[in-house]
Every structure is written in C-alpha cells, then in structure tokens.
Amino acid sequence: MGSEGDHARQRFGSWRETIAPIFDVRPLAGDWDAGFHAELDRHHLSTALVGQVSTSAQHYERSESLIGAVGVDHLLIQRYEAGHTTLDLDGEEVHAGPGDVVIFDLSRPVRSHASDMRAVNLVLPRSLLALDVGSLDRVHGTVLSGASPLGSLAGDHLRSLLKAAPTLEATAAPDIAKASAQLLSACLSPALMRESEAPATLTATMVMICRFIDRRIGDPALDTRMLCSAFGLSRSALYRLFAPIGGVSDYIRQRRLARARLALNASTRGRGGIGKIARQFGFSSDDAFSRAFKAQFGIAPRDAAHLRLSPSLDADDGSLANWLRHLG
C-alpha cells in the first residue's frame, strides 16, 4: 500500500488536471503531501456553470498560454465561504476573505495564492453581463466586500443558486442564468462606473450595440454605417457614445482581435489556419491581420498559435474545458 504522501500526490495530480482549463496550480505549503485535498462540484445551467470548490492552500496562475489554449473569455465569479486569497494583478495586490465576492476575467492573466479555502463559483459568458465596455474592461480582480450591502446581496444569490442548481429544471436554467447575470451586473456597476462615463440611458444603448457587434463580429460589412442603421443613431451620436473608450472603430477592431486570439488554438492546426481566422473575423488580408494582432498583443499570430497546452485539455464531453467552450 502507498503512503499518505503518495495518495496526496495522486489527488493533487487529478485535481491539477481537472482545474487546468481555468488555472495552473501548485501547492503552497512545504508539507502539502501530508494531506492534500480538493473537491469540485459543478452544474451546467445552459448558459452558465455553478458549483463549489474546496481545496488545500495553493498557488494559482492563469497565463497567456493557458488563455490561448482554452479559448474562452467568460467571467468567473467566486464567493469565498472560508479562507483568504491574495491576487497579483500586474503588480497590484488585491485581498479577499470570507464573504467577499471576487471577479476574474478569464481572458486576462492573473496570479494568486490562497490558504485552505472553500468558495461558490459561477462562470458566465461576458455577453450576459449588463455592463458597459469600460466597466467590463475594469472588472478583472474586482472584490465586492461581504460586509457591503451589494456584496452581501451578490454572495447570497450565489449561495442560493448553488443550492437550487441540482434540482433546477433544464427549461428554466437559461432564464435563471440570465437573471443572475442581471443581478450581479447591478451589484458590480457602482463599483466599476467612473463619474466621467456615459449616463445610464446611454450605457444601456451601448451594451446593446456591443452585443450586436459581438454577434456580427465576422461580418466584413460591420462598421459605423451598419450600427447607425441598426440603432437609429447619427454618426456623431455613435462617436460620442464610444469616445470614452477610444472610439467605435477601435472597439470593433479590438473585439475582432480578441476573438481571433481565442480562436487561434483550435483553428491553426490545419493548413492555412491563420488566414482562415483573418477572414473569419473580418480582416481584409493576412498581412493586415498579422500587423494588427502584433500591435495589440506584442506577438505574431503564428507565434501565439504555438502557445498551447497538452491534448488533455481537449478531453471528453464531460470535461470542464468542454463545458467552458460550449456555454450558451
């Protein structure tokens, strides 16, 4: 029979493979193999994943290579039930503890370390969030204090959703996920909004326009003329709406590049993959795509395509990676 240390190492290996689509993990404590534990349960709600995690102390990292390998840009929302975590966001430290709600943008890198912990998890496609573009750009690493009214409301909802998930009827799941996204957006919005940004009526219009852009992101005809026609806006009104984030044309280009970046891992294995992606996301030529991609991310598309992880991330239909890729 193996020792407890052998069993702990086996448990850690299984856990690391399970959580690999979201984080690369390594033990925090020097004597971790004396009793490592990790449990994860999850429930599919059609357009969302909800579950609970309980683990020993660990380091967590979501790197550029992992982001490219899995190819999702959802949001992970955690309500800490027990334990503490410290996030490293480009050198800025953010702390969270019991009762706090933490938001991760899975299209952005992060490093963290956590004590023994237990948390409720919710994964939502970013398109479900009723947040303006500027707020979505700032949401990564946001912590809602469990002692605040909105943090308490968000955390209580996550716990209620987890409790209901096992018996929730499949036909109700999409509407419940959408309602959850709306409630969490309302809880997050005050913490993310800047005074200089658009008023609420314009923000609502902007959210609708951004969703329209994401739906039509592969259409080469997607431009200001199409948006003005679809939403009954003048060019000047559209430009004013997007001015705080650099302009509407720049936003369309950034969304095309972001989607292309996520698609690189799955689509470049065959011949002509990068050219296919360039056309899929509305770029007029391979050269134009390559120049824009390198300017945005500091790396050529061909090099980014090689930032892949092991084939284990393309596991069976019930794998976490597959669930993440097929939300919606």
Image: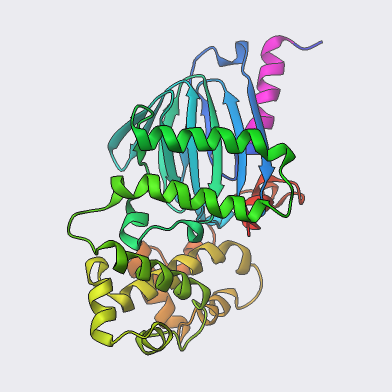
209 left or right of 262 in image = left
Magenta span has 190? no
Q: Quadrant of residue 209?
A: bottom left
Furthest residue to the left? Answer: 196
Q: Which residues are magenta?
A: 3-16
Residue 254, percent from left and from top:
38, 69
Q: Is residue 5 magenta?
A: yes
Identify whether 191 is placed above or below 130. above
Question: Which image quarter holds the C terminus?
Answer: bottom right
Residue 177 at x, y percent in the picture: 58, 51
In this rendering, position of residue 53 left or right of residue 196: right
Residue 122, visible in the rendered structure: yes
Side (left or right) of 150 relative to 25: left
Residue positioned 48% across, 41% down in the render: 77
Q: Is residue 203 above or below residue 187?
A: below
Q: Position of residue 155 (x, y in %)?
A: 47, 34
Name the spot of residue 273 as percent of width and height, x first: 59, 74
Main secondary structure found in the magenta portion: helix
- In this view, 153 is above or below 279: above
> Is residue 308 shown to the viewer in this render?
no
